[in-house]
Amino acid sequence: MTDDTQFGRVADDGTVFVRTADGERAVGQWPGGDPEAALAFYRTRFDGLEAEVSLLEQRIKARAVSPEDAVSALGRVRGTVADAQAVGDLEGLTRRLDALQPLINLRREERKAEKAAKLKTAKASKEKVVADAEKLAQGSDWRNGVTRLRELLQAWKDLPRLDKPSDDALWHRFSAARTTYTRRRKQHFGELVQKREAAKAVKEKLVAEAEELSSSTDWAATARAYRDLMTRWKAAGSAQRDDDDALWKRFRTAQDVFFSARTAVNAELDTEYAKAAETKRSLLEEAERLLPIGDLRAVKEAFRSIADRWDAAGKVPRGDVKDLENRFKRVEQAVRGAEDVSWRRSNPEAQSRARDTVAKLETMLTSLRADLAKAEASGDERAAAELRDSIAARETWRQEAAKALQEFGGA
């Protein structure tokens, strides 16, 4: 007996039977033919069924088919095997199919666990999207916030849906964050427009003031006024870019008109000051030739003429003032000093006091020398030493007093 005859037979009338646990079942007719050929033909049909069962086993084991599709395929193949017009171990195929159900159940639990894990991850991702949106809604990134919210919305759409309550609750928070951000951004730019309009109004007034000052020739006061205008300009804030640029151009033009005029005037003054400095240097050379002073009256007259011309020469560059003034003062002080000496010499009261001082010192020296002679005669060396010191000191005073008297023209 062959393997095929183990699972089926061909009756004398050509009927082909397959053997099952429930008995024989007719699967076809093979009239007037070779029984072995008939069984081989129906065995081929069985081989096709077996291949289909094997393919289903492989796909389920390889997770190439979802549990739902696997159940559907299993039912279809099971029905095909049950009604198969084939000869072979149909019971074995049925057992193999039965063995797939626990595997499908396992795959279903695995899919359920994977789905739960994915939903958990998705929920965490959506919660992060919501948290980022809420943080953005409370911030002030008005430049990049719109783009970032758009990216967060796309990230939300790319994530799978959660259970309806969780998904709805998170979406409500996300939507509220977007609304809050949009409202605050709109309010910000509305306030910004108002501030820029206010800044524009202030700067228009400042420009008008600057343009009015541009023709002023009160150089110091107007320069201070422009500094004040600049301080107020900075404090005014920014207007719209085009308005700000146009107003600033007018403001700077007004400033340039004033400061260019001041620079031109200063250049003329610098030329005048330089000429004055040259004049005063020549006068200094003339004045310094008066020293040392001989004829005081002639020197005073000459210096008076020089001083008048000095004052008439006018201002000099700031860097030359100190040197020129110091040199002029030295000559002036020398003349005044000579005047003081001359006055003292012609002062009768001072001359009398000087003569009295000399006389008193000479009288005192005469007395001290007499006392010294007595001390030396008596051998009182201590008294003699003290008297010598007194005589030396007063002799010095007498000499100085005599010099002063000579300056007054005394004897």
Image (tube, rainbow, N blue to C red):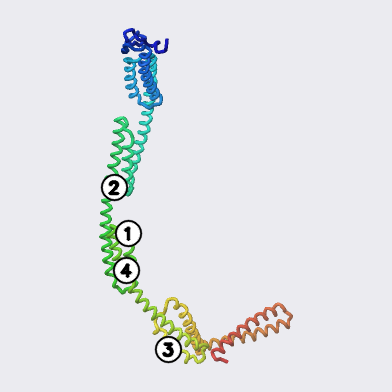
Q: How many marks are shown on the rendered structure? A: 4
Q: Earlier in the sequence, mark 4 or mark 1?
A: 1
Residue 363: x percent and y percent? 62, 86
Q: Which mark is residue 305?
A: 3
Q: Which mark is residue 185?
A: 2
Q: Amino acid at mark 1?
A: Ala
**Does residue 346 appear in the picture of this structure?**
yes
Left or right: 279, with 387 as reference point: left
Residue 77: x percent and y percent? 33, 19
Q: Which mark is residue 322?
A: none
Q: CA distance from mark 1 to mark 3?
A: 57 Å
Residue drawn where x is 26% and y is 66% of the image:
208
Q: Amino acid at mark 3?
A: Ser
Q: CA distance from mark 1 to mark 2?
A: 25 Å
Residue drawn where x is 30% and y is 59% of the image:
236
Q: Mark 3 falls on what kind of element?
A: helix
Crowd band around label 3 with a 10 angstrom C-alpha radius: few (<14), some (14–19), many (20+): few
Left or right: 391, with 163 as reference point: right
* Residue at the spot of label 4: 255
Most foreground residue, 117 or 251: 117
Q: CA distance from mark 2 to mark 3?
A: 81 Å
Q: Earlier in the sequence, mark 1 or mark 2?
A: 2
* Residue at the spot of label 1: 235
Q: Mark 4 falls on what kind of element?
A: helix
Marks 4 & 1, CB-CB < 8 Å contact: no
Q: Earlier in the sequence, mark 2 or mark 4?
A: 2
